[in-house]
Amino acid sequence: MIRKLFMLLLLPFVTLREARNSSFLSFLHIENTETLFFTKTEESISIRSSYRDKRPNSSYLFVQAEDPKVLQVVNVTKTLSDVTNFVINLVTDEEGETNLTIQLWVSEGRRERLIDEMKDVRVQVLKGRMDRLPQASMHIDRRILALVLPTVLLNKCAFGCKIDLQVFQTVWRRPLPVLLGAVTQFFLMPFCGFLLTRILALPEAQAFGFVMTCTCPGGGGGYLFALLLEGDVTLAILMTCLSTLLALMMMPANSYLYGRLFGLSGTFHIPVLKIMSTLLFILIPISIGIAVKQRMPDKANHLERIIRPLSFILMFVGIYLAFRMGSVFLKTASREVLLLGILVPALGLSFGYSFAKISRLPLPACKTVAVESGVLNSFLALAIIQLSFPQPKADSASVAPFTVAMCSGCEMLLILLFYKAKKRFFLIGEDKRKKNSLI
């Protein structure tokens, strides 16, 4: 009895802040509370609430923008009379950044009581910019792609001339490198992406974008970097093709699993045609290169000589295009997003190389497994996001694959420069030792 009286006396002294911080008394819910991106003149926000009115229409929502020059509240509409779900209609005046304060109030006769409050809901207004820049950049990028596409096909054909068919037989007898790459790409990397997004508390859409990027198969740049780092080129091409084929099964499974873990509803559209076209885009020119090597060895030798210069050109063009297309999204990226963009390819490289080294694979195979685990086809994740999410949530989630693609290209370039510099110093040291031994 005394304990009950003590609890009753204590309850009035519980502050409103403490009540809001407890999970069972938090009523207001909004998606992407980290940052809301507005790109049109008129925008709306849906607010979900678990609070029910004791009397019809007794509750209302108060919304205030910190900077009325950037954002103005037009009206607040209640969806149902007894359930406090609201739609906030807003008008954007100029580009900039501001914060929203959202409060849920209830009228109890002449007295009004604050039920819940959301402070500092960050809003970025990018009116016009998100529409104009992608169109302008894509207009220029199409011209570049028209020039680069024949070079890409020629380079893939040259890679086909470099394939050693005996490696296929070796991999068939000992498929450990392929299995290590598949486990890292489709199981370990998505799980790590999920954990990191939870630790950094990213919004659901952006977090899902990162997980989908982590579950992508190896990209076409994988065997390009494997060649420049003196890895096993044939193994790299085989791993890229097999991981792209496995993606038809693993990407839908991972999108369903992690979508449910993030609490995202709806159907996630897997770009099956895009995955198949990616696979054919790799297989057809490489098959032509294999046929050229078998029937015209002299021409195959000429093609092999141009692989390295073409690969360097395509590497720099790929990094440029990634930055050009992703620059719009990069402007809206937070520090957490940039940190994840750096971590994702670095973790893939580290996991792949470590597992291959522990498995005592040859050094070229270790390099190949690392590259195939770290260089991902991020644009497949971009296709899933654009097909599955409405705007502007799709643009917010698309930051993830673009950031990973840009960071991956820069990291691989740094690794390549470090490897070439180390090799050059080693050769210079060897020459000096030989000269000293002759003297």
Image (cartoon, helix red, strand yellow):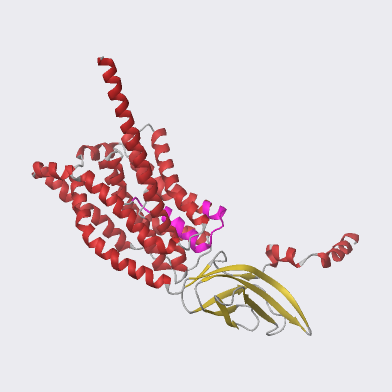
Q: Is residue 298 left or right of residue 94?
A: left
Which residue is depicted at the point 44% across and 67% down? 394
Q: Which residues are magenta?
A: 196-218
Q: Main secondary structure of the magenta part?
A: helix
Residue 326: percent from the left, percent from the top? 39, 61
Q: Is residue 269 left or right of residue 228?
A: right
Which residue is depicted at the point 28% across and 39% down? 232
Q: Does residue 250 appear in the picture of this structure?
A: yes
In the image shown, does 226 or 289 lie closer to the viewer?
A: 226
Residue 162, compared with residue 285, is above or below; it is above
* Image quadrant where one finds the N terminus: bottom right
Instruction: Please check the rendered image and state whether residue 209 is part of the magenta-colored stretch, yes or no.
Output: yes
Residue 117: percent from the left, percent from the top? 67, 70
Q: Does residue 176 appear in the picture of this structure?
A: no
Farthest front residue in view: 439
Q: Is residue 51 left or right of residue 158?
A: right
Instruction: Please check the rendered image and state whether residue 90 is part of the magenta-colored stretch, yes or no.
Output: no
* Image quadrant where one finds the C terminus: top left
